[in-house]
Amino acid sequence: MYDPKELFADRESIDSFVEDTLSDYGEYVNGGMARLYRFLGFTTLEWYAEGSTLVDIHGKRYIDCAGYGLFFHGHRNPRVVEAVKKQLDTLPLSSRTLPHKPVADLGKLLAQVTPGNLQYSFFANSGAEANEGALKLARAYTKRERFVATHGAFHGKTFGGLSASGRELYKKPFYPLLPHFDHVPFGDIEAMRNAVTEETAAVILEPIQGEGGVLLPPEGYLQAVREICDEKGALLIFDEVQTGIGRTGKMFAAEHYNVVPDIITMAKSLGGGVMPIGAFTAKPEIWSIFDENPYIHSSTFGGNPLSCAAGVAAIEVILEENLLERATLVGERLLKEFTNLKERYPEVIKDVRGKGLLIGLELATEGAGGMMISETIDRNLLVLHSLNNPKVIRVMPPAVITDTEVDRVIEVMKEATVNVAEVISQL
Ligand code: PLP
């Protein structure tokens, strides 16, 4: 670790380094975000991370249960880092002229760990890109134009991803988006039945909505959507960018519900918390479009050796270190403790729900989310709000979190809830 104490003469030098960085951020990256950082009092920098711990430049240590769900393997997982370093010393990026091994290895591994007979994978660089590819593939294969998606959904911020997403705030400034997307309430089987027709190329949904506020599908919903798609000849795309690769205690959330989609998309945890990577994996018959033209969909960086080496290591770590069992166990404990909190402080917490290490606490009042997050940060715990439902705080610990750290997460959430309850009682 580059110890800031060795790099900087004193506290003042660190503060002025942070100040310069923040003002460059505001001037050259994102002015609005820089103002938000200052408003929230985030006048420090992420500097070092390992396992569940993130350390800022001032030496403050946080338990990281945020990270947009990236760190299922923790920060800098040693086996993933080792695999990436090894690849870095041989072939980091491909010339894309000849084949290379890491991409074939990852494709084969994904065929083994994805549900049902999903077999072929395309590799991209992000979740949104994975969804773009899946939507394109559905159109090309079915030769149909329409899509059905759900309210509150989050599928990324590219044009296709946004068109499928379900919150106006992020869509409106960019109109017109792609045509032919219909939206129905998540969990409403009748609305889905009415929306899917012989013109529907695909239904796209997250089996558990993440940014929508950790919404679990009602009993039988995903099976019913599968049947509706089969009846109408539409494909079913599961966006598992957030839920996939272990987060919910299964390799894919689809497995909780015994439903096999036609295409599954993933990103986040697939990079093992070290490399950016996205992918979509589909049934063999759908892939025939690549037989006709192998260049029909492509990406210069997609499927690069470094990211694929990280992906292979990420999946192997999960399987060999029993991280799915660990995620289930820790998740059950947190869910139980947070449910107890909800029962004691219903004026603060309205609902608690989740699967594995994707846990949402729905707060009872607008604004309580900000208060809660600032209380937890004061106590060295990072949690995050939900982009499409800010009243829901998400707690997404890594599966490598220790029992002592879990104890601390529970303690901090209790203290934060008590304090927010006190503020609310004075309003
Ligand atoms: N789909 C889902 C379900 C997500 O949660 C996200 C990101 O949070 C995305 C897609 C977009 O992924 P990315 O930010 O990598 O483009």
Image: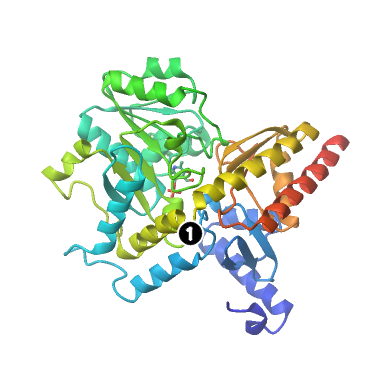
**In the rendered image, is residue 300 in sight?**
no
Q: How many marks?
A: 1
**In the rendered image, is residue 96 in sight?**
yes
The local secondary structure at tag 1 comes to loop
- Expressed as whole percent of the image width and height from the top left, the position of residue 171 reads 46, 36
Residue with the mark numbered 1 = 273
**CA neighbours of label 1 inside 10 A, class few (<14), some (14 to 19), many (20+):** many
Q: In the picture shown, does residue 53 fall above or below 117?
A: below
Q: Is residue 302 left or right of residue 53?
A: left
**Which of the 4 quarters of the picture holds residue 20?**
bottom right
- Expressed as whole percent of the image width and height from the top left, the position of residue 7 reads 62, 83
**Residue closest to the eye, 299 or 217:** 217
Q: In the picture shown, does residue 34 fall above or below 257?
A: below
- Expressed as whole percent of the image width and height from the top left, the position of residue 27 reads 55, 63
Q: Which quadrant contains ligand 1?
A: top left
At 58% from the left edge and 54% from the top edge, which residue is drawn?
Answer: 33
What colour-coding does the image apply? rainbow
At 62% from the left edge and 39% from the top edge, which residue is drawn?
Answer: 360
Q: In the picture shown, does residue 415 fall above or below 10?
A: above
Q: Is residue 413 left or right of residue 211?
A: right
At 69% from the left edge and 73% from the top edge, which residue is drawn?
Answer: 15
Q: Could you tell me the amino acid type at mark 1?
A: Gly
**Residue closest to the eye, 349 or 74:** 74
